[in-house]
Image (spheres, rainbow, N blue to C red):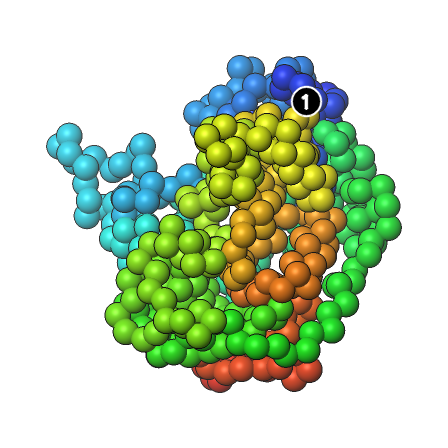
Amino acid sequence: MNQPILELKNIKKVYPGVVALKNVSMKFYPGEVHAIVGENGAGKSTFIKTITGAIQPTEGKIFFEGKEIVNNNPIKSLSLGITAIYQEFNLIPYLSVAENIYYGRFPQKFGFVDYKTMYKNAKKVLDWLGIDINPKTIVKDLSVGYQQIVEIAKSISMNSRVLIMDEPSAPLTNNELKYLFNVVKKLTQQGVAIIYISHRMEEIFDLCHKVTVFRDGEYIKTMNVADTNKNDLFALMVNRKLNDNFPNRNYTPQEVVLEVEGLTTSKVSDISFKLHKGEILGFAGLVGAGRTEIALAIYGADKVRSGSITLKGKRIINKSPAQAIKNGIALIPEDRKKFGALMNMTIKENISYSMLKKIAWKFGIIKANFEKKTANEYKDVLSIKTPSINQKVINLSGGNQQKVILARCMFTDCEILIFDEPTRGIDIGAKQEIYALMNSLTQQGKSIIIISSEMPELLGMADRILVVYNGKIAGELLKKDADQQTILKLASGCDGGTYEN
Ligand SMILES: Nc1ncnc2c1ncn2[C@@H]1O[C@H](COP(=O)(O)OP(=O)(O)OP(=O)(O)O)[C@@H](O)[C@H]1O
Ligand SMILES: [Mg+2]
């Protein structure tokens, strides 16, 4: 354990207007899970991209087993067994699971891709992971959670010695998380060094041996996990004390604004529920249970086979998201990369995009001052870390990209907001800002549906919780009757819970 497998010395990375990393030195050891924590934009992803050679540091050196890696690049680091699962998934949606695992290194036979061997090998890796996915499945047909597993399978198949995971747990639900933990433990037993980035504190304490705090691109401190606690970590991350509370909600039921009856699509069936004015309605369930699919159907992004949607007493049919928004229903999607941000546009443009009517003059000229003011307001409220609102979204850290999309959706005139995993990848400080914002939106008379895999978030925010299992609503709980155990029971079809559903 004394010899680090990987060492970084004095790493610095400068982008125009931003010093993303300032003189960071760290060591990583075989068989250890080493967490890196810090606020959105603290420099975590930049640090790991430096290790994999995806970006070049402005200054600094990297050593693998004591030997310097000169002119690091992704191919070189891979050949040493440094693999990474990035925050943004890197799978190719239209290829199969096996093709993704072996992409760029397909087994060959007589100059052709040897599919038989490829499927067989992929199956072996998936079996080792203890997961029942057909290697021929097209990746886009898998849930986000399963896609994550394919990413892991890909890393493992490359004989990883250092495995970097940038928020691997973000799309996973509780059961999947347990599964991920087992895989990580299995890998450490084989002497793999794991670098683990997460915004979920519990995971750090359940899984990791060491934890390092980054703040504003600076290395702050490395500690043994056993010697620290959540409050201390938070204080190091943000330089202030943790306020763990959810906003105080005293919701009294008001009139029904949305009524869904017998909604059926290819993925969900016979969904009926009511949403009231000013209410926060939570959707609980396992990955693949159908929560997102219900939202997509209401939002006009998925074909409705039968059933009805009634908005303030009027039957509506949303044939497209554009129509849903016109009807006053907005969705903040789970897969924000795919639906959400206009990556090559600026923060300002992204925020104003959804409300062009509000900010455009009669003749289509943007009210520049109003646009700027609003964008700056949201930047402050959600503490979007950037030198300027004229920065392109693609240049922001993962969490800050999320905040831009949230800001965009919150800025619409829509009365019904559907949030699918709103705080995934968002640091704990900003999470609380988002909860407060949701609360104030409902006080303004808006109604919210929140889909979340984070139990404390649902229990803390929702006035009522619907539990979805297998494409159907398995139960309804009022805030006062809801607890983790009851939800999990319903979410797993009352049979004690299995990983697959
Ligand atoms: N290509 C780029 N151009 C300009 N600035 C960048 C670029 N990539 C990252 N940055 C900036 O560097 C800083 C660190 O970003 P990084 O992605 O490393 O943060 P992070 O700690 O991973 O945050 P998160 O928790 O949100 O993922 C941020 O201020 C970000 O805006
Ligand atoms: Mg990041």
| Badge count | 1
Q: Position of residue 65 (x, y in %)?
A: 61, 28
Q: Quadrant of the C terminus?
A: bottom left
Q: Position of residue 342 (x, y in %)?
A: 46, 35
Q: Position of residue 412 (x, y in %)?
A: 54, 49
- Answer with left or right where residue 16 lies relative to residue 346: right
The residue lying toward the viewer, choosing from 176 and 307, is: 307
Q: Quadrant of residue 464?
A: bottom right
The residue lying toward the viewer, choosing from 381 and 411, is: 411
Q: Residue furthest front?
A: 362
Q: Quadrant of the N terminus?
A: top right
Q: Residue at x 57, y 31 (%)?
A: 367
Q: Quadrant of residue 10?
A: top right
Q: Relative to 486, say whether 388 is above or below.
A: above
Read off the residue under disc 1. 18
Dot 1 falls on a residue whose secondary structure is strand
Q: Label 1 amino acid? A: Val
Q: Residue at x 54, y 60 (%)?
A: 415
Report whether residue 44 is seen: no
Q: Residues within 10 Å of mark 1 (few under 14, many from 20)?
A: few
Mark 1 close to ligand 1, CB under 8 Å:
yes
- Answer with left or right where residue 432 lies relative to residue 375: right
Report whether residue 17 is seen: yes
Q: Relative to 408, say whether 364 is above or below.
A: above
Q: Position of residue 191 (x, y in %)?
A: 58, 45
Q: Residue at x 58, y 47 (%)?
A: 411
Q: Residue at x 40, y 71 (%)?
A: 314
The residue lying toward the viewer, choosing from 35 and 468, is: 468
